[in-house]
Image (cartoon, rainbow, N blue to C red):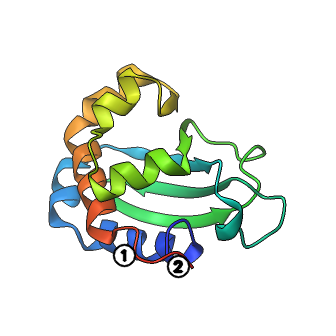
Amino acid sequence: MFPSEEWGNAYVEALNSSADLARVGRGWSWQVLLVVDEIPEHLLRAPGTKRVGYLIDLNDGKCRSYKYLTDTESAKTPYRIAAPYEVWTRLIEGRGLTPDQAIYTAKIRVRGDLARISRFTEAAAVMVRLVRQVGASEPY
């Protein structure tokens, strides 16, 4: 199912159902774009599109809106978290890579005000836990 629009819908449902995120996400009020690069050919829905994005608008621990994007370059957002498909699936499946390791080894690229987002490490941890909860499932 990952990296499909359906996966994004399931992730947003998990975000909005999480009492933990509602608690630790208070004060977080901005968009974040999760970008999946280098998607294998056999998983592509649109030929030539090797990248998709999940534009998530968060406000106080809830997702106000969500868009699945095949054009991530034109998206205007204060935060962008990007990684190759293989890195995302390792994170989702919990296969020997933590989010911190991925960031510190530049496997995940984070753009935006890191000082501001660092105040929400608990919320970020809950969001990663929810990514793993939704899982990768079978490819579409």
Q: Secondary structure at mark 2?
A: helix
Give whichever of 129, 121 is nearer the camera: 129
In the image, what residue occupies the spot 35% across and 44% down?
28
Residue 55: image x %, image y %? 57, 56
Task: Choose top left, top right, bottom left or bottom right for residue 122.
Answer: top left
The crowd level at tag 2 (other Cα within 10 Å; few <14, some 14-19, many 20+) is few
Residue ID for mark 2: 6
Q: Point out the frontmost of discs 1 and 2.
A: 2
Q: Is residue 30 above or below residue 15?
A: above
Q: Earlier in the sequence, mark 1 or mark 2?
A: 2
Regarding residue 118, the answer to whether it shows in the image is yes
- Give the amino acid at mark 2: Glu
In the image, what residue occupies the spot 34% across and 57% down?
92
With 68 as the anchor, is 131 left or right in this view?
A: left
Q: Is residue 69 above or below residue 81?
A: below
With 129 as the anchor, is 15 left or right in this view?
A: right
Residue ID for mark 1: 13
In the image, what residue occupies the spot 27% across and 39% down?
98
Residue 26: image x %, image y %? 25, 48
Verify CB contact (< 8 Å) between mark 1 and mark 2: no
Residue 24: image x %, image y %? 18, 48
- Give the amino acid at mark 1: Glu
In the image, what residue occupies the spot 50% across and 49% down?
86
